[in-house]
Amino acid sequence: MSPPPAVRPRARLWLVRHAQPVVAAGTCYGALDVPADAAATQVAAQRLAQALPAGAAAQYSTLQRCELLALATQALQPNLTIHPDTRLREMNFGAWEGHDWDSIGQSAIDAWTADFALHRPGGGDNLATLLTRVAAALSDARQQAQDGNDVVWFTHGGVARCVAWLLAHGEGPMPRADEWPLAAPAWGEWEIHHLT
């Protein structure tokens, strides 16, 4: 009688959000390349380096607030491989970037929420575009996880919300504003999803 087949470990996706950005409260800063607080980045890196399993591979958004956390984590866990991935960048709010949300105006925000998936706030990205690029990255992460090793993304709140939507609904339906997941990891925190 042959032994039962070995159970392959379930690979996971770690969605790690950058530490608190150095930007005035109330500022729109999706694609704006603002730095993260250096001390908070180090604290987050120390906690994450202790939690990550061996063999994990990581991608990071090319915005500096994510790259800094990826590099700080790798310095504490040298066997962590990291690679840049522009698909993990936050949504680009075009002309709204760097402006106070209150100065953007309620009518402009209402126009966005009325056509939530397809409207381009500030002339930047629309949510459909963001979902498409996150879905492509998620498909690659599933391929990468075939060996059972975890995948780590150093990314943003918007990308984490896209992953939550895609895991719950797939790539077909486009969300309305009132359906969009509001929960995302806090700055310097993470959430874990199974990939296989």
Image (cartoon, rainbow, N blue to C red):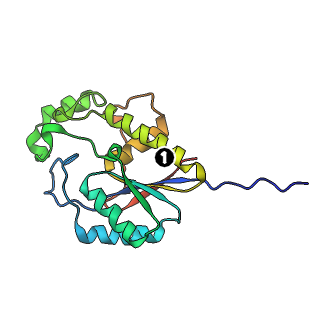
Relative horizontal placement of residue 61, taking residue 164 as reference (left or right): left
Residue 128, image x, y percentages: 33, 31
Query: Which residue type does callout 1 highlight?
Result: Ala
Relative horizontal placement of residue 53, taking residue 159 as reference (left or right): right
Q: Residue furthest right?
A: 1
Q: Identify which residue is drawn at 35% across, 48% down.
A: 85
Residue 186, image x, y percentages: 33, 58
Q: Count the labels in the image.
A: 1
Q: Nearer the viewer, residue 179 or 122?
A: 122
Q: Quadrant of residue 127?
A: top left
Residue, disc 1:
141
Q: Residue furthest left?
A: 103
**Helix, strand or loop for disc 1:** helix
Within 10 Å of disc 1 (Cα), the crowding (few <14, some 14-19, many 20+) is many
Q: Identify which residue is drawn at 63% across, 56% down.
A: 9
Q: Nearer the viewer, residue 131 or 114?
A: 131
Residue 72, image x, y percentages: 33, 68
Relative horizontal placement of residue 169, taking residue 63 as reference (left or right): right
Residue 55, image x, y percentages: 53, 62
Does 60 appear above or below 113?
Answer: below
Assign the N terminus to one quadrant of the image. Answer: bottom right
Q: Identify which residue is drawn at 28% across, 27% down.
A: 118
Q: Identify which residue is drawn at 42% across, 44% down.
A: 163
